[in-house]
Amino acid sequence: MLLKSELLWTYSPKDFFEFNSPSVHTADGQWRFSDGVATLLLATPVEPLPPDVMIAARAALTNLMNARTLLVDRSFELAQNPTIHQHTENGINHTMMALTGSLLVSSLGQMDFVVGDSLGNVLRDTGKERRDTESQLMVERAQKMDASSVLAFLHERYHHALSHPASEFVHLFEIVDAVETYFGGKKAANQALGITAARDVLGAHANDKPVLEGRHNGRHHDRLRPATPDERQQARGAAKAIIKAFADSL
C-alpha cells in the first residue's frame, strides 16, 4: 500500500534556506527546505508518478526559490532531476526521474535576537518572526507567478542578473523593458505602477554610467570601469521595487 510520495531536489548553497525555515504549502503539497534539499510531500500519493506532475512541481519550486532570491539577494543552483521516494508499508522505494539540464540562479547579514524572561521562557524570537514572514511572502509571490507569466519572467531576469554579474545591469534593465511592453510604454508603466523614481535609477545605472555591466559600453569605451558594490545594490533595489509594484498590481 502506498502511504506517501515525496520528490526531492538538491540545491546550493545549502544555506539558501535557513536551518529551521518553516515548511510551506502550495497546490502541489507541502515543501520542506533543509541542508540543500527541497522535499515536496505530494498532497495525494501516486505511483507511478506522471511526468507532468513532476514538471509542474519543479516549476513551482523554481518560483519559490526565485521569490526567495528577491528576499535575500542570493543566487542559487537547482538540480533538474528529483529523487522520488515512494513510501509503502514495506519501506521506501527510491527512483531518479530524468529531465534535462540544471538551473543556475549573495546573503546580506541578518541580525536576529531572542528575548526571554528570568525563567528562560522565550518572549520574542525575531529570527522566527522573520522566517515565518519570509515564507509567507515567498508563497504569496510564487502563487502570483503561477498566474502571471510576466511576473515569473521578471523574477527570472532578476535571478539571471545575479547569476551573471559581468552583465548584471543589462539583465536588470530587461525588467524595465518587460514592464513597459506590458503596459504599452514608459509613460503608461510609470503611471500604472508609480515606478518613475525606480525606473530612473535603474536606467541611469544600465544606460548612462560608464560601467562594464551596463548596456552601452561602446558609448563609454574610453572610460569604462567596474560597477561599485553600492551601484549594484542601488540597481538591484530599483529592480526589486519595480517587480514589487508589478506584483502588487496583480
Image (tube, rainbow, N blue to C red):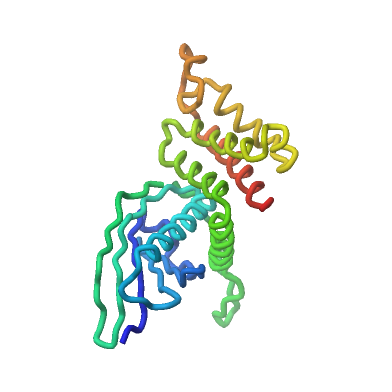
State the quadrant of the N terminus. Answer: bottom left
**Residue 230 seen in the current view:** no
Say whether residue 125 is left or right of residue 47: right
Find residue 94 and report its horizontal and vertical position in percent: 24, 72
Find residue 103 and report its horizontal and vertical position in percent: 36, 49
Residue 92: quarter of image: bottom left
**102 w.r.t. 125: above or below:** above
**Residue found at x 32% / y 50%:** 102
**Residue found at x 62% / y 36%:** 181
Number of marks: 0
Say whether residue 103 is left or right of residue 139: left
Residue 174: quarter of image: top right
**Residue 8 seen in the current view:** yes
**Residue found at x 51% / y 69%:** 27
Find residue 80 and report its horizontal and vertical position in percent: 33, 55
Say whether residue 21 is left or right of residue 242: left
Find residue 7 and report its horizontal and vertical position in percent: 35, 68
**189 w.r.t. 76: above or below:** above
